[in-house]
Image: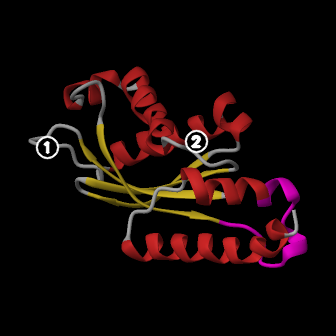
């Protein structure tokens, strides 16, 4: 499972929207429920959940069975839903065709801790993600990624030298 943590803020810098307003919270929760139950999210094993709502910031989590190269694109469904079903409320807050500035805070991959808990397919996906698609957001993550790659190289060197 791949998990992406986002901070969403108004796309219009001078916006006076209050995400803590009960009406807005209800619309957000309805939108997320509808999106999570929709065909695309169900098919792809994606879910969105709200972690925290402040006056002008929403913290949310996007979870997915597979790695996403552009994870923020999945959140565009939230803008589409809100501007389609609640256009009278949200349309004034749209800027550059979106309601939100989306900032990816961090991302994680969750696999079983025991080797036999990881399927061969998940193992290969994880290796490919580490080598080619994983975007680090902190120095700690970058260092961990480099260390992991070096450990993998050390493990495979003896097998490659026999070929």
Q: Which residue appears at 28% of the width and 29% of the height?
A: 89
Q: Which residue appears at 52% of the width and 71% of the height?
A: 146
Disc number for residue 33: 2
Quarter of image, res 114: bottom right
- Which range of residues does the magenta coloring cover? 110-123
Looking at the image, is mark 2 or mark 1 earlier in the sequence? Answer: 1
- Which one is in front, 147 or 89? 147
Element type where label 2 sits in the image: helix
Other residues around mark 1 within 10 Å, as few (<14) / some (14–19) / many (≥20): few
Q: Which residue appears at 57% of the width and 44% of the height?
A: 68
Question: Is residue 86 shown left or right of residue 129?
Answer: left
Position of the N terminus by quadrant: bottom right
Residue placed furthest toward the right:
116
Residue 14 place in picture, x, y as percent: 8, 41
Which residue is under mark 1?
Answer: 16
- Which one is in front, 85 or 8? 8
Residue 86 place in picture, x, y as percent: 37, 26
Question: Is residue 106 shown left or right of residue 126?
Answer: left
Residue 74 place in picture, x, y as percent: 51, 38
Say if the magenta span includes residue 158. Answer: no
User: Would you say the residues marked 2 and 1 are in contact, meaning their CB atoms lie under 8 Å apart?
Assistant: no
Element type where label 1 sits in the image: loop
Q: CA distance from mark 2 to mark 1?
A: 25 Å
- Which one is in front, 38 or 105? 105
The answer to whether 98 is drawn above or below residue 103 in the figure is: above
Other residues around mark 2 within 10 Å, as few (<14) / some (14–19) / many (≥20): some
């Amino acid at each position: 499972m791949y998990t992406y943590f986002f901070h969403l803020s108004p796309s219009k810098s001078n916006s006076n929207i209050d995400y803590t307003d009960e009406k807005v919270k209800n619309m957000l929760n309805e939108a997320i429920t509808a999106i999570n139950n929709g065909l695309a999210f169900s098919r792809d094993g994606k879910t969105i959940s709200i972690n925290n709502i402040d006056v002008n910031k929403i913290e949310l989590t996007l979870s997915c069975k597979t790695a996403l190269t552009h994870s923020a694109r999945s959140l565009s469904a939230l803008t589409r839903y809100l501007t389609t079903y609640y256009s009278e409320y949200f349309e004034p807050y749209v800027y550059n065709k979106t309601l939100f500035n989306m900032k990816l805070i961090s991302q994680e991959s969750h696999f079983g801790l025991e080797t036999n808990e990881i399927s061969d397919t998940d193992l290969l996906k994880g290796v490919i993600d580490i080598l080619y698609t994983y975007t680090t957001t902190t120095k700690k993550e970058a260092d961990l990624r480099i260390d992991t790659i070096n450990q993998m190289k050390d493990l495979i060197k003896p097998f490659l030298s026999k070929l």
